[in-house]
Amino acid sequence: MHTLSFATLAAFAAIAAAQTSCPSAMPISLCCITLEPFSDNAYVWENVCGVTVPDTTILTASGCAAGTSLCGSQQYEDMYAACCQEYLSRLSD
């Protein structure tokens, strides 16, 4: 399993409701630190990242690692399981 850069991933997400796999419309399975509406951080999304969305209530997640199964482990217990349509990542050196 490929683990994405933890601090730099931002995902367009929907909460995974106790699923073992994500639906085909949102095939990326993640475990994330934050999950909030795009509008909560719209200035950064639009002006720093160059990302716009038609619906600013769409949930976005950050601080993610690949795989919702991680959310059940002690190290990731306070994180959100998410199924995502797509993600943006900036991998750190």
Image (cartoon, rainbow, N blue to C red):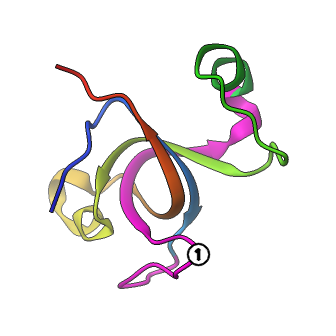
Give the x, y percent position of residue 31: 35, 57
Give the x, y percent position of residue 56: 81, 42
Residue closer to the observer: 62 or 49: 49
| Quadrant (top left, top right, bottom left, bottom right) of the C terminus | top left
**Residue 75 part of the magenta segment:** no
Q: Residue at x 48, y 47 (%)?
A: 87
Residue closer to the observer: 16 or 90: 90
| Quadrant (top left, top right, bottom left, bottom right) of the N terminus | bottom left
Tell me if mark 1 has few (under 14), some (14-19) or many (20+) residues whose alpha carbon lies within 10 angstroms of its own: few
Q: Quadrant of residue 89?
A: top left
Dot 1: element: loop
Q: Is residue 21 left or right of residue 16?
A: left
Q: Is residue 88 left or right of residue 37?
A: left
- Residues rendered magenta in the picture: 17-41
Return the residue at label 1. 25
Q: Residue at x 66, y 51 (%)?
A: 59
Question: In the figure, 63 relative to 12: above or below?
Answer: above
**Residue 36 part of the magenta segment:** yes
Q: Quadrant of residue 43?
A: top right
Extreme residue toward the top, this view: 48
Residue closer to the observer: 27 or 82: 27
Indicate the amino acid at tag 1: Ala
Q: Residue at x 24, y 22 (%)?
A: 92
Give the x, y percent position of residue 71: 29, 63
